[in-house]
Amino acid sequence: MNRIITFVGLCAFSFPLLAAQEAEDISEANEALVRALYDEKEPTCYNFTDEIPPEKYIALPECNNIPSSYSGAFEIGAFFKTDSRNSAFAKTGLDLDHERGKLRTNVRLDLFIRKTEQQDSETNESDYETTDQKWTSTIQSNYTFERGGKNYGFGFASYEDDRFNGYEYQSSVAAGWGRRWFEDDISYFDAEIGPGYKIDELNTPEPGDSKTQKAFIVRTAATYETRVFESIQFKQIVSAEIAPKSGESSKYKSISAFSTQLVDALALKFAFTVDYNSKVTGNIQKTRTETSLTLVYSI
């Protein structure tokens, strides 16, 4: 009987000890799991977009898994005017952006065409003829010098084919330095400058002039974008390709655009473009303007 009592007493005393030990083991396991899930680990490398204090990443190498992203927009517009001379207009464009670490690349394609009804004086038959046609393409890559910095180096190339501005084509390349001078939650301002080279092919050169004109240039450009209202964006782009040598053609361009959001991925865009060539042939005007209203679909 005494042995039975002793055994029961030992069991009664052991059970709380075992339960306490088990509870302690469970608590330690839970703490290890929480640390694995939520505790911050010391970084061994850093991405360009990581928010790591400078004292932690200053001696760390960049990670190989550099983040990459794509974005873009496609726009299209068409108009038809009816009067004594009917005419039709069409405009389309593609704007693509690729960002990978410190490198950001933009590709832009634009096409504008106008057809006007012309009447044959002999047959009195009417037909639509192309009275305006222009397509342009540009590519620019910006490389930011420091993480989160404002200074960047840029490379730029453009090609323009305009049937009615006196040139078969105009092309240019440039490289230089740029800076984001201002930025807040709703707006930013970039400006850049650098040397370059251009090649212009004339349709009908003046007597004594070469059909192909080549020149060194200085390219400057500035971009300002802001949100005017909750759903309206304003963007202003100005650029100049200045040929310092006397007698050579310089080119200036200004684009003012308002965009208003219609639905999630669809917007309405109004743009006004001014092109100026300092040297033209024949009766071609130096300044040409273009007003457009297009639908923009974000990719």
Image (cartoon, rainbow, N blue to C red):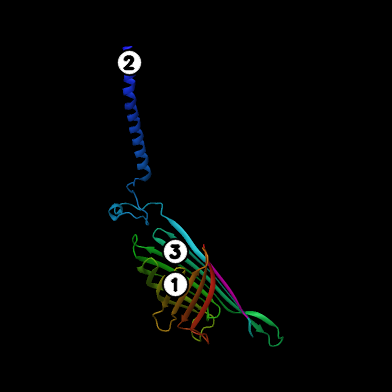
Residue 82, percent across and down? 63, 81
Report which residue position mark 2 lands on. 5
Numbered range of the magenta stretch: 74-81
Residue 285, percent across and down? 50, 85
Label 1 and label 2: CA atoms lie apart by 91 Å
Q: Secondary structure at mark 1?
A: strand
Label 3 and label 1: CA atoms lie apart by 18 Å
Q: Quadrant of residue 111?
A: bottom right
- Amino acid residing under circle 1: Lys
The residue lying toward the viewer, choosing from 222 and 78, is 78
Tell me what residue is drawn at x 44 percent, y 72 percent. Answer: 235
Residues at marks 3 and 1 touching, judged by CB atoms closer than 8 Å: no
Local crowd size for mark 3, using a 10 Å CA cut-off: few (<14), some (14–19), many (≥20): some
- Lower position in the chain sequence, tag 1 or tag 2: 2
Local crowd size for mark 1, using a 10 Å CA cut-off: few (<14), some (14–19), many (≥20): some
The residue lying toward the viewer, choosing from 34 and 165, is 34
